[in-house]
Image (cartoon, grey):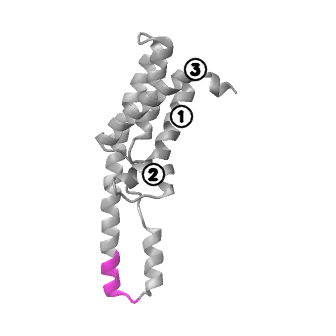
Amino acid sequence: MILFDNYPLFAAFSAIIISQIIKVPVALLLKRPSSVALATSTGGMPSSHSAGVTALITSLIAEYGIQSPYVAIASTFGVIVMFDSMGVRRQSGEHGILINELLADFEELRKTFTHYTQEDIKKMEEERQSREYLGHKPIEVFFGILSGIIIALVIGLLY
């Protein structure tokens, strides 16, 4: 299969998949809420965004050398991805938390003025949830970078 012949591509995808999978046990170790759904969600420790782009950069350095234009392209792309995962996406998550708090306050206020059943209220609350956790904390990005380097180097040993 062509994918397995392309070390940088295989390293990057492997880092993303491995990082997503290890989010579940890491969350359990850190005593945070954990479920299998965490493996398919954004956010969490380690950052699969950072792991993927770092594995790509590391494997390109190993294959073509640090002077390669491929490394320059991947590094630029990587910095943008990591900055975005901490910045814009993180702020979106913070806004999601505030929106959910406002919706909960609004529901409490509405309960005092209306006579909905508990079932009606629960249904409305489920429909009006905003995604809260989209981005990464700097420590999650840091461990994503470490994961990406380690995964790329281990895969490189197999090539």
Q: Nearer the viewer, residue 141 or 27?
A: 27
Q: Amino acid at mark 3?
A: Tyr
- Percent of width and height locating residue 107: 35, 76
Q: Nearer the viewer, residue 158 or 91?
A: 158
- Percent of width and height locating residue 9: 56, 27
Badge 2 marks a residue whose secondary structure is helix
46 is higher (above) or lower (below) than 127: above
Badge 3 marks a residue whose secondary structure is loop
Q: Is residue 4 magenta?
A: no
Q: Which residue is mark 2?
A: 24
Location of the N terminus (image quadrant): top right
Residue at 34% across / 81% down in the picture? 110
Q: Which residue is mark 3?
A: 159
Residue at 43% across / 31% down in the picture? 148
Which region of the structure is painted magenta? Answer: 107-115
Question: What's the distance in space between the residues labelled 3 and 1, CA to CA?
Answer: 14 Å
- Percent of width and height locating residue 109: 30, 80
